[in-house]
Image (cartoon, grey):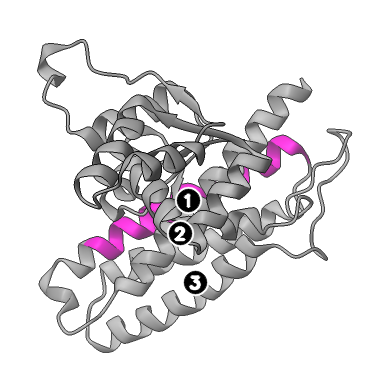
């Protein structure tokens, strides 16, 4: 898997010995580690300017990423796009270089990633994806045979089911408060995610599996939209929807990653 690490992840990996350091080791050992020239230069500038890193520290810092592929930055050619922010250039570079996953600790970067058709996760989210067993979403070697994963551990199946339960409780609360329009939209899309994942676990073919997962992905993004709308309107007064928003976004990222990987596997097989 081609994994692009953002500047903040690299800095945390160098300065600490926790999650980001372990993430960097894992990516370097098991995947294709990527950074861009802009990220590499930011890494150097922040360590030197903000943290006062000397020559020895900088040498050690760059040893951590010596295995990384340095991607050329995708600066816009169109003058109308000439004022892109650094974050937007990084996202554009990751997209144009066809990376499989972007890892960032910047919530703004994660929120913008879908606009660039990128799968992006936090460092903790990376390990949640990496912890999924290889056969959690199994494919038969024969397209005519059914895909069955009912008895296997399936993180996205469990998360989507638990999310649906919370959506039902939210719906009941909204109904009690006489909110009848958005509540029905949220109930429909929020429970549809798990329903489509459930159908995908017993899909009739690889194509059917991908189709069901894509529907679940779209439903998760729609649910996130309705939740945002509810959260930022007067209808959500005195309601904390931050956890549901986070879970809807997390499901969307997981499902995007699954469908992308499944589609690539299908193309390789064909």
C-alpha distance separating marks 1 and 3: 14 Å
Q: Residue at x 11, y 12 (%)?
A: 79
Residue 58, x across and y down, in percent: 37, 40
Write down the residue under mark 3. Answer: 163
Numbered label attached to residue 250: 2
Residue 234 at x, y = what percent? 10, 73
**Above or below for 103 versus 87:** below
| Residue position for label 1 | 253
Task: Say whether residue 200 is magenta.
Answer: no
Q: Residue 111, labelled with which disc?
A: none
Q: As rendered, which of 58 and 115 lies closer to the eye?
A: 58
Disc 2 to disc 3, how far (Cα)?
11 Å
The segment highlighted magenta reads: 205-228
Tell me, yes or no, if residue 265 can be seen here. yes
- Residue 263 image point, x, y percent: 64, 32
In the image, taking residue 254 as reference, residue 167 lies left or right, namely left
Circle 3 crowding by C-alpha within 10 Å: few under 14, some 14–19, many from 20: some
Q: Residues within 10 Å of mark 1 (few under 14, many from 20)?
A: many
């Amino acid at each position: 898997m081609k994994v692009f690490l953002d500047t903040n992840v690299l800095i945390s990996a160098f300065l600490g010995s926790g999650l980001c350091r372990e993430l960097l080791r894992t990516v370097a050992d098991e995947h294709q580690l990527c950074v861009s020239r802009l990220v590499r230069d930011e890494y150097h500038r922040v360590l030197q300017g903000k943290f006062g890193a000397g020559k020895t520290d900088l040498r050690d810092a760059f040893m951590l990423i010596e295995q990384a592929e340095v991607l050329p930055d995708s600066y816009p050619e169109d003058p109308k796009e000439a004022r892109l922010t650094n974050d937007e250039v990084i996202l554009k570079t990751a997209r144009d270089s066809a990376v499989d996953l972007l890892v960032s600790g910047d919530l703004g970067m994660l929120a913008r990633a879908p606009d660039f058709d990128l799968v992006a996760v936090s460092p903790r989210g990376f390990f949640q994806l990496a912890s999924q067993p290889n056969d959690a979403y199994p494919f038969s070697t024969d397209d005519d045979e059914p895909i069955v994963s009912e008895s296997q551990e399936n993180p996205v199946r469990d998360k989507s089911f638990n999310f649906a339960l919370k959506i039902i409780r939210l719906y009941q609360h909204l109904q009690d408060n006489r909110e009848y329009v958005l509540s029905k939209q949220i109930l429909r899309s929020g429970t549809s995610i798990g329903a489509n994942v459930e159908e995908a676990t017993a899909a009739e073919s690889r194509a059917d599996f991908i189709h069901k997962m894509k529907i679940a992905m779209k439903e998760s993004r729609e649910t996130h939209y309705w939740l945002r709308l509810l959260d930022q309107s007067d209808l959500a007064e005195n309601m904390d929807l931050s956890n549901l928003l986070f879970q809807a976004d997390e499901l969307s990222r997981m499902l995007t990653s699954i469908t992308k990987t499944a589609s690539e596997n299908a193309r390789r097989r064909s």
